[in-house]
Amino acid sequence: MAWSFIALVLCIATASIDNVVQAVHIPIRGTRGTASKFRRQHNPLRPGTLLLVNSGDISYYAEIGLGNQSFRVLVDTGSSDLWVSGSVLKSIDTGKDASIQYAANKVEGSIKQATLEFAGHVVADQAFLEIPSGSVNTEGQGILGLGPGSSSFISDKLGLPAGAPALDRIFAQNRSVPNYFTVLLGRHTGDLRSLYRLDLMLIQSPDPTDSFNGSITVGEVLKDYAAILDETKLNITTVPGNMIEEQHLQVLLDTDGLIGPDGHSIQIESNVTQTENRKQATVVFDCGFTLPQVTRSVAEAIYSKFFGSKFTQLPGLGGVWILPCEQEVNITFSFGGKLYPIHPLDMSIEPSAVNLTGFQTPSGEKGCIGTFQPFTYDRGSNPTYDMVLGMAFMRNVYSLFDYGDFIRDSTEVENAYVQLHSLTDPAEAHADFVSVRLGGVDTTGDRGLKSENDARKKSIYYVIAIVAVVAILTLAVVVYIWRRRRRGRR
C-alpha cells in the first residue's frame, strides 16, 4: 500500500491534502502553464535531470508537464501513483475511478491518460488520477510517486501496462535507460529568497546541500557524485507475496547500526517477521516524510538523554520530543559496513518551520522539535518495516534506487538495490550548527548528557530520602510510645 505522503504530506509538511491528521497546514502554490514554456525557462540541466524546490526543508517538489500543462508535484519515493488537482485539458478519460490510500488519508478521482514530461523523458498516455481542486487541494498541485509499481492503486483498476506508474513506463519504453533514479535533497540555509527560484543551476560546493535545493535524475547520476556507483549495493528486501502491495524501497540496517548521541549503539529489536536477524531493522527510504518515523523506544534513546528534553503531544503533529534549540544532537547510521552521520541541523527543527510558536523546554529555554518522531500511525499487526527514514535522513546522502527486476518484462536480472553516498562531514556539520543555532559562539561543550550515573545518583537520593523519612517516622513513633509509657507510670 502506498502510504508515505500523508503521513507524509508530509508528516508535518505540506499538509494541503484532505486535512491530514498529523499535519500542519502549509499551502503549496500550484502553477499551470504550457509544458514547453516550462522546459525552456526552468530546466537548464541536461535530459534525465529534474530540479527540485526545497520549501523550508519540509517538502520538495518539481515541475512536470502533463497534457502540455505544467503542474507542481511533491516527489514521493514512498508511493507509486501520480495525481494532480484541477483539469488536464489534453487528456483521455478512461471511464474508471480510483482512490489512492496513504497512511492517514486518501484522494479520489477519475483515472485519465495524458502525455507526461518528466526529467527529460516523454511518456505517452501516462495514467494518472485527476482530482477536483479546492481549498484543500489547490489547482495545479499533486503528488508524483516514485516507489515500486506493485503498490500502485491505479494499475489495480486499469491493469498493465496501461496503468503502470511513470518510472515503470520510462524504463520499459527505453531499454537503453538504466533502471535507476537518484535523489539529492538540499538543506535550507536561511535564505528564503532561494526557496522559490526554479532557475537555479548546480552550484559546485564541498557540501552540495549548502547551496542546492535538490534534484532527481532518471537513468544517470550527477557527474560530480559519480562515486555513488562504487558504493555498496544494499539489496532491497522483499515482502511476502501476499503483501506485495506493501513493497517499498527498503533495506536492512546493520546490526547495532544506529549509534546514539552518547556514542553507543541503540538496541533495536525488529518487528518484521521475515527478517532472520532481529537485530537488523528494516528501514524505508521515503523523501515524502518530513519527520522520520521510528519506534517510541528509538526516539527516546535519541532525545531523552539531554537536559531539558521532554516528550509531548502537539496538536496537529502528534507525539514528539521537545529539546533546547541550542542542543547539538549527533547520531550515525551504518549500512553495508559504512557510517552515515546525520547533520545536527537535521536532528531538530524550529517550531516556526511548521507554523508553531512559543515553544519552551521545562527548563525555560527556547524549544525545538526532535525530527525523529515516534510512529504517528498504526503499521498493523504484521509490519513490513521498522522505521521510515525521511527527509531529515535523506538530506545527508545522495541516494540511488535501482529497480532491477521490479520492472515487469525487464531485461535486468539482478535484484533491486540501493546505493548511498554520504554527504555530511561531522566537523563541517558541527560548524554549521554553531553558526546557525548558536550565533557563531560554540557553547556545545557546556552541555553534557544525562548519564546512567545521574540516574543511579537520583535513585540513591530517592532511597536515602525514603530511608530518612522512615527513620524519622520510626523515631517519632518510638518517642510517642516512650512518652505515653512514662505518663502511665506516673
Image (tube, grey):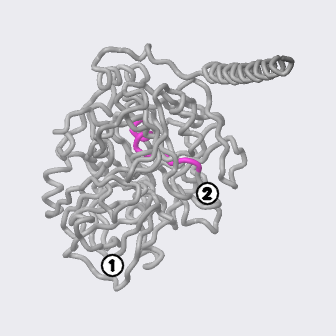
Q: Which of marks 2 and 1 is in front?
A: 2
**Is residue 235 visible in the rendered structure shown here?**
no
Quadrant of the frame with the C terminus: top right
- The x and y percentages for residue 292 are 46, 45
62 vs 39, left or right, is right
| Observer-nearest of 433 and 377 | 377
Kindly identify the residue that appears in the image at 60 percent across and 44 percent down: 252
Indicate the quadrant where residue 361 lies: top left
For residue 199, the mark is none
Few, some or many residues within 10 Å of mark 2 (<14, 14–19, 20+):
some
**Is residue 50 visible in the rendered structure shown here?**
yes
What amino acid is found at the position of numbered circle 2 in the picture?
Pro
Residue 278 falls within the magenta-colored stretch: no
Indicate the quadrant where residue 295 lies: top right
What amino acid is found at the position of numbered circle 1 in the picture?
Ser
Kindly identify the residue that appears in the image at 55 percent across and 58 percent down: 378
- The x and y percentages for residue 355 are 28, 46
Q: Is residue 70 above or below residue 249?
A: below
Kindly identify the residue that appears in the image at 62 percent across and 22 percent down: 458
Indicate the quadrant where residue 65 lies: bottom left
For residue 383, the mark is 2
Few, some or many residues within 10 Å of mark 1 (<14, 14–19, 20+):
some
Q: In this view, does 89 lie above or below 346?
A: below
* Labels 2 and 1: the sequence-earlier one: 1
| SS of the residue under disc 1 | strand
Q: Is residue 66 above or below residue 347?
A: below
| SS of the residue under disc 2 | loop
Q: Which stretch is magenta?
A: 386-396
Kindly identify the residue that appears in the image at 30 percent across and 38 percent down: 358
For residue 110, the mark is 1
- The x and y percentages for residue 25 are 29, 55
